[in-house]
Image: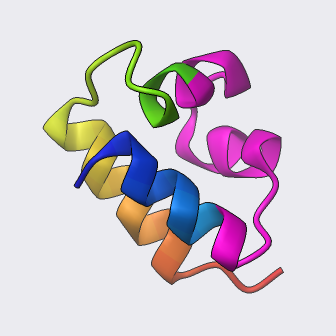
Amino acid sequence: MTGRAIKILRITRNIPQWKLAQRVGITPAYLSAMETGRVEMSDEIEMLLKKAINEWSE
């Protein structure tokens, strides 16, 4: 999954960037860099992000 796809899912579900980053254990700046393609997303971070988005209930 690309960073852009993560961003679209996050925005569609009204998840603030800082809250998703906090839940996954990364900084909002790092999440932003992945969403914009400035840094590559590791498989582990991708898995954590997808899980957090799918389980989001706030």
Task: Look at the picture and state if 5 lies above or below 31.
Answer: below
Q: Residue at x 39, y 42 (%)?
A: 3
Residue 22 in view (yes/no) = yes
Q: Main secondary structure of the magenta part?
A: helix
- Position of the N terminus, as image quadrant, is bottom left
Question: What scheme was used to colour the molecule?
Answer: rainbow
The picture quadrant where one finds residue 29 is top right
> Percent position (x, y) of residue 2?
28, 47
Find out whether residue 20 is within the magenta segment: yes
**Stretch of the chain drawn in magenta:** 11-32
Q: Residue at x 48, y 81 (%)?
A: 54
Observer-nearest of 33 and 45: 33
Observer-nearest of 49 and 6: 6
Image position of 20 (left or right of 39): right
Task: Look at the picture and state if 6 lies above or below 21.
Answer: below
Task: Look at the picture and state if 56 lies above or below 38.
Answer: below
How many marks can you see? 0
> Percent position (x, y) of residue 41?
28, 30
Residue 26 in view (yes/no) = no
Image position of 5 (left or right of 53): left
- Position of the C terminus, as image quadrant, is bottom right
Q: Residue at x 69, y 79 (%)?
A: 13
> Percent position (x, y) of residue 42?
21, 30
The picture quadrant where one finds residue 10 is bottom right
